[in-house]
């Protein structure tokens, strides 16, 4: 575990030491792109601790709004900083429980049987020239879905947003956008690298330059008034090496910068 993380957790470690070990249910709200990794995490964590993770997956925006409305989440993992900050600004996350957990990349995908070859994404790349007149590019809705927000930022950086925006198929979350390409209903899609890695019927034809969008990081935090010892224990475990190895299996990286806390 990184030294900065160890230091940040010292202030809450006493909660674990004063609580007798017993199996508990822990409700985790997590971004849809974490579905496969967190499902395996839950299985591993149950074996290691006896605690059961009750997982709820959706767009980060949907989950954040549910928490704001009083949904009983013990831990929230967002696919971008925006929705975590939205909760924090309302005083709805526990002080000093916010950490950057994971990092990801953004890619352009096509159906596995597509004739499209690998391309370089640059200022002169015209994505609309790669699809038919009636076709659309699948993406999480840029108005609220983190993957779509990153996609919009990348396309704006490349000078393509104005031309591509009218040709988008806006999905409720990144997995829904992935499914449109998997089923051949969209000839192109913009998703996280980890989503493309686990898909069976798509191929990556380009990776968006890292400097075309802000770093894709996944912050996690304990919602306000949900800081029970079991939640703190899970948060600590997710920052550790065992969880890191599982996340790596699904293509996630740890953030390069020190974890952000609040």
Image (cartoon, grey):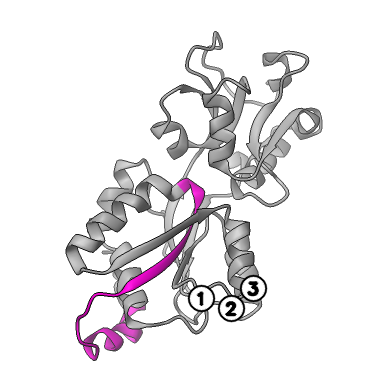
Please name the residue that numbered disc 2 is placed on: 92
Q: Residue at x 43, y 49 (%)?
A: 34
Front label number (2 vs 3): 3
Using a 10 Å C-alpha cutoff, classify the residue at mark 2 as few (fewer than 14 neighbours), some (14 to 19) or many (20 or more): many
Query: Where does the image place residue 89, in percent across and percent down from the top left?
Result: 65, 76
Q: Answer with mark 1 or mark 2, whichever residue precedes in sequence.
A: 2
Q: Which residue is drawn at 53% across and 40% down?
A: 175
Q: Answer with mark 3 or mark 1, whichever residue precedes in sequence.
A: 3
Q: Residue at x 42, y 48 (%)?
A: 35
Please name the residue that numbered disc 1 is placed on: 223
In this view, the residue in front, 40 or 4, is 40
Query: Where does the image place residue 87, in percent across and percent down from the top left?
Result: 61, 72
Left or right of residue 19: residue 155? right
Front label number (3 vs 1): 3
Left or right of residue 229: residue 183? right
Q: Residue at x 68, y 52 (%)?
A: 144
Q: In which quarter of the image is residue 164?
A: top right
Left or right of residue 91: residue 117? left
Q: From this view, report whether residue 172 is shown above or below residue 196.
A: below
Q: Are marks 1 and 2 in contact (CB under 8 Å)?
A: yes
On the question of residue 19 being in view, the answer is yes
Q: What element carries label 1?
A: loop
Q: What stretch is highlighted in magenta?
A: 8-33
Which quarter of the rendering shows the N terminus?
bottom left
Please name the residue that numbered disc 3 is placed on: 69
Query: Where does the image place residue 135, in percent across and percent down from the top left?
Result: 72, 19
Q: Is residue 229 magenta?
A: no
Q: Quadrant of residue 240?
A: bottom left
**Mark sitting on residue 135:** none
């Amino acid at each position: 575990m990184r030294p900065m993380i160890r230091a940040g957790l010292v202030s809450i470690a006493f909660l674990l030491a004063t609580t007798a070990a017993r199996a508990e249910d822990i409700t985790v709200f997590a971004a849809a792109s974490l579905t496969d990794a967190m499902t395996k995490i839950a299985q591993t964590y149950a074996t290691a601790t006896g605690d059961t993770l009750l997982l709820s997956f959706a767009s980060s925006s949907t989950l954040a709004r549910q928490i704001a409305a009083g949904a009983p989440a013990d831990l929230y993992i967002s696919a971008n900083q925006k929705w975590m900050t939205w909760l924090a600004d309302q005083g709805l996350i526990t002080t000093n429980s916010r950490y950057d957990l994971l990092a990801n990349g953004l890619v352009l995908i096509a159906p596995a049987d597509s004739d499209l070859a690998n391309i370089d994404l640059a200022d002169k790349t015209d994505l609309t020239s790669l699809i038919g007149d009636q076709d659309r590019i699948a993406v999480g809705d840029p108005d609220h879905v983190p993957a779509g927000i990153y996609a919009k930022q990348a396309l704006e950086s490349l000078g393509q947003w104005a031309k591509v925006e009218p040709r988008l198929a806006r999905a409720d979350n990144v997995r829904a956008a992935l499914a449109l390409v998997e089923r051949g209903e969209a000839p192109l899609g913009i998703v996280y690298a980890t989503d493309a890695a686990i898909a069976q019927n798509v191929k990556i034809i380009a990776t968006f330059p890292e400097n075309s969008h802000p770093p894709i990081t996944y912050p996690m935090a304990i919602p306000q008034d949900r800081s029970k010892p079991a939640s703190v224990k899970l948060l600590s475990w997710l920052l550790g090496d065992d969880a890191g190895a599982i996340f790596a299996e699904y293509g996630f990286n740890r953030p390069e910068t020190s974890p952000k806390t609040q």
